[in-house]
Image: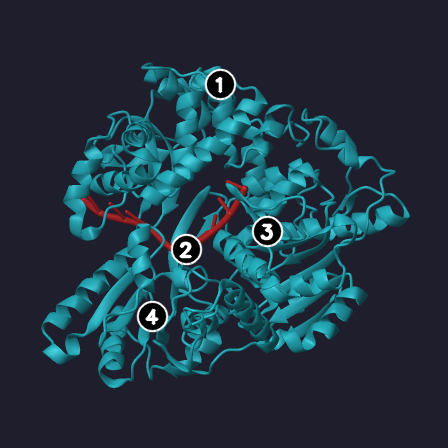
DNA sequence: CATGTAGGG
């Protein structure tokens, strides 16, 4: 993500506020800046209710805080609590965020506000990047990371307060975390008086027994029942106006409201439903450009392809326009776009030009773009859904929810009054769902369930989720985990495989692949494979350079499939990096590396991410004592290991280039991004089955059908 | 023959 991305509800000093007097000494500048910060803090809407808020937090063990955009809740509340001595005995205030950038940027800001060095009293902790220390009292973190911490410290004993921020987004991690925190809070208040263990749902869990199985030894001494825990304060922060869901879930917890600071945004609707929303968007862009005052335009579209095609249409029309009205700069942004191109949205348009930003929902929450005065919202979004019966995920274009539409229009009112053009009639807005369906009801649950099992939750169906996933989805994932050997016949975490799998921050099927690979003597290769599979797609193919990107990919491609191709890319990258850093030093080699990626149509952000994952998982498997062997040139053994690992995802060729997925019987096609797209081997294993325009399998390798029966007899022997 | 909303560990 671009580093310029800011997040949430805080105000950054603008550059013009910096001292203009070059003669002033540093000390003065410093105290100037302190003054400025103090003034900004005082002017935040939340500053006037500090005392009342702290009182409410003292009185209530759980508090819901509804804070509108711009209230300052994310940066200020932790500081209020620190000032009110909520960190006695070296305890920590933890604040979770759904996204890494948010945790990092907010922590930096708060450290500055407090006048401390980042990593001292104020720090952050996200995957691959931990600035917290033993002196840290205010710790910003991703909610996924706090869940991982809970595996090592189930009572989260170092925290006196945990604040779950952006709870309205209802990400999987946030939902699971809230369920966990509810139990932890109960257990800690009980332990203070009665010394009871963790209680999940209806069932008391014997954490001691389950954790004894874990061979780590380091993590579980505190589970002794005589240990006393200080009570835990919980604060759930949400930007949505509807606090009722949270309040009901947390046993009628009190909710308070904090004013925000947003500029008004006028909303416009179309008179009639638009038959072609892309055409309507195009017309609206030019109406604003030719008829409205200065200010940039943000258009919400559903995906890369749509963005690229509208970009072409706008530019075509511009070349036909009179000179004076040509001053429109089109800038696309979506997650798969290489970072340096993403950064273009933050650059101001050249003088006299207006920017029009074509964005996916990345611009709803993840990236905040300055200068937006007009928002065009066709009211659609591409969303994931999951069919447990078929084991298949789908990406479909669906109407946004009301809250999503509000979030989008709000993007026009961050710096001044704005306008939002919704490309549908007003009565359609009334028919939208109030809020987006929580993600936990739309995804494969294997990972969530493995986590919960490792936390000692045995009865997943009885677990007190804020919103329960369907029974079918839970059972399907339990089944998958059983077939992977992570669960025993009694549905408990298996020892050691299940515990090992839960420790690895990977999809369960990838964790299993690593464990098997150590037996197939190809762990080195499999480690690269799962790192590459865990990152976003490595190759980047822009529409206008399709042929070039295909040629580049060919130089790495293996006739055996995508997995070996990925290994070749990874090794080429590592070799290039090693060579260049000897030749020209680390700093310069970075630049050469980015050039290398660009020439090869590889997304350097994705590849670096894969390297980070590789390094982290390498550490884990070494700690687990798995044997880190390489199969050398014997890729047959590696492919057999892929078959043994991904046997649930096998497909055989049908007439006319179609394939039949063996587990569900669905007829699928090979995704055009695969190196096997034209090869059409008899039998393949794959990693993803997604329905978009068609049913596609992605990331494939050619295997021998007979291997399945040999290597996964528990699954295939019965059927055949 | 023809392609990946957004996040997280």
**Structural distance between the alpha carbons of marks 1 and 3:** 37 Å
> Chain B is which colour?
red
Q: Is residue A267 left or right of residue A238?
A: left
The residue beneath circle 3 is A123
Q: CA distance from mark 3 to mark 4?
A: 33 Å
Chain painted in cyan in the figure: A
Q: Is residue A720 visible?
A: no
Q: Nearer the viewer, residue A469 or A87?
A: A87
Q: Residue at x 64, y 26 (%)?
A: A494
The chain holding disc 3 is: A
> Residue drawn 74% across and 68% down?
A54
Instruction: Answer with mark 1 or mark 2, whichever residue precedes in sequence.
Output: 2
Q: Position of residue A620 (x, y in %)?
A: 54, 28
Answer yes or no: do the residues labelled 2 and 3 have beta carbons within 8 Å? Answer: no
Q: Which residue is mark 2?
A: A3
Mark 4 against mark 2, which lies toward the viewer?
2
Q: Residue at label 4?
A: A298
Residue at the spot of label 1: A518
Where does the image place residue A682, in percent across and percent down from the top left?
Answer: 28, 26
Task: Reply above or below: A75 against A138.
Answer: below
Mark 1 and mark 4 lie on one chain; the one further toward the N terminus is: 4
Mark 3 vs mark 4: same chain?
yes
Look at the numbered discs 1 and 2 and tell me whether their residues touch, using CB distance below 8 Å. Answer: no
| Placement of A599 over or under A306, stated as above or below | above
């Amino acid at each position: 993500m671009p580093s310029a991305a800011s997040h949430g509800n805080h105000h950054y000093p603008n550059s013009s506020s910096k001292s203009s007097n070059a003669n002033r000494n540093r000390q003065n500048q410093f105290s100037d800046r302190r003054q400025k910060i103090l003034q900004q803090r005082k002017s935040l809407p939340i500053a006037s209710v500090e005392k009342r808020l702290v009182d409410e937090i003292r009185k209530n063990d759980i508090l819901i805080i509804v804070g509108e955009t711009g209230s300052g809740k994310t940066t200020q509340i932790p500081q209020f609590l620190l000032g009110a001595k909520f960190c006695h005995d070296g305890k920590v205030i933890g604040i979770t965020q759904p996204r890494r950038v948010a945790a990092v940027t907010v922590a930096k800001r708060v450290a500055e506000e407090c006048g401390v060095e980042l990593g001292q009293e104020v720090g952050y902790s996200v995957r691959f990047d931990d600035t917290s220390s033993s002196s840290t009292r205010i710790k910003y973190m991703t909610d996924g990371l706090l869940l991982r911490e809970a595996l090592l410290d189930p009572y989260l004993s170092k925290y006196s307060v945990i604040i779950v921020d952006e709870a309205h987004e209802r990400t999987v991690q946030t939902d699971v975390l809230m369920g966990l925190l509810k139990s932890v809070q109960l257990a800690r208040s009980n332990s203070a008086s009665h010394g009871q263990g963790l209680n999940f749902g209806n069932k008391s869990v014997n954490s001691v027994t389950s954790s004894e199985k874990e061979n780590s030894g380091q993590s579980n001494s505190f589970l002794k029942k005589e240990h006393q825990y200080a009570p835990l304060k919980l604060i759930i922060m949400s930007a949505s106006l509807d606090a009722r869901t949270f309040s009901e879930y947390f046993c009628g917890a009190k909710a308070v409201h904090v004013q925000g600071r947003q500029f008004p945004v006028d909303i416009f609707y179309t008179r009639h439903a638009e038959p072609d929303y892309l055409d309507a968007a195009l017309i609206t862009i030019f109406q604003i450009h030719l008829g409205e005052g200065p200010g940039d335009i943000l258009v919400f579209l559903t995906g890369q392809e749509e963005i690229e095609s509208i970009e072409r249409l706008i530019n075509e029309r511009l070349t036909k326009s009179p000179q004076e009205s040509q001053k429109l700069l089109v800038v696309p942004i979506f997650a798969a776009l290489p970072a340096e191109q993403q950064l273009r949205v933050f650059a101001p348009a050249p003088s006299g030009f207006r920017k029009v930003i074509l964005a996916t929902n990345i611009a709803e929450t993840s990236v905040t773009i300055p200068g937006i005065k007009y928002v065009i919202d066709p009211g659609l979004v591409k969303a994931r859904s999951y069919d447990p019966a078929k084991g298949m995920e789908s990406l479909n274009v669906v109407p946004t929810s009301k809250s999503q539409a509000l979030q989008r229009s709000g993007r026009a009112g961050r710096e001044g009054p704005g306008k939002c053009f919704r490309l549908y009639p007003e009565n359609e807005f009334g028919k939208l769902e109030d809020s987006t369906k929580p993600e936990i009801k739309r995804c494969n649950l294997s990972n969530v369930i493995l986590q919960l099992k490792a936390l000692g939750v045995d009865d997943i169906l009885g677990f007190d989720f804020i919103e329960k996933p369907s029974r079918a989805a839970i059972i399907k994932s339990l089944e998958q985990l059983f077939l992977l050997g992570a669960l025993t016949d009694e549905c408990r975490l298996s020892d050691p495989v299940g515990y090992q799998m839960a420790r690895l921050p990977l999809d369960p099927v990838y964790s299993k692949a690593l464990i098997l690979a150590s037996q197939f003597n190809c762990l080195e290769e499999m480690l690269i494979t799962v790192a590459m599979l865990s990152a976003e797609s490595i190759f980047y193919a822009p529409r206008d350079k399709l042929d070039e990107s295909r040629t580049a990919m060919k130089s790495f491609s293996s006739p055996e499939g995508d997995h070996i191709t990925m290994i070749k890319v990874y090794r080429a990258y590592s070799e290039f990096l090693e060579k260049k850093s000897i030749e020209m030093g680390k700093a310069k080699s970075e630049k050469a590396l980015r050039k290398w990626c660009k020439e090869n149509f590889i997304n350097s952000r994705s590849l670096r991410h894969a390297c980070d994952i590789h390094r982290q998982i390498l550490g884990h498997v070494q700690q687990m004592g798995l044997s880190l062997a390489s199969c050398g040139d014997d890729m047959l053994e590696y492919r057999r290991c892929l078959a043994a690992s991904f046997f649930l995802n096998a497909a055989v060729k049908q007439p006319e280039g179609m394939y039949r997925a063996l587990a569900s019987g669905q007829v699928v096609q090979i995704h055009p991004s695969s190196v096997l797209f034209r090869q059409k081997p008899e039998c393949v294993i794959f990693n993803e089955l997604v329905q978009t325009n068609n049913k596609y399998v992605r990331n494939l390798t050619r295997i021998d059908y007979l291997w399945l029966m040999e290597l996964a007899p528990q699954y295939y022997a019965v059927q055949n």
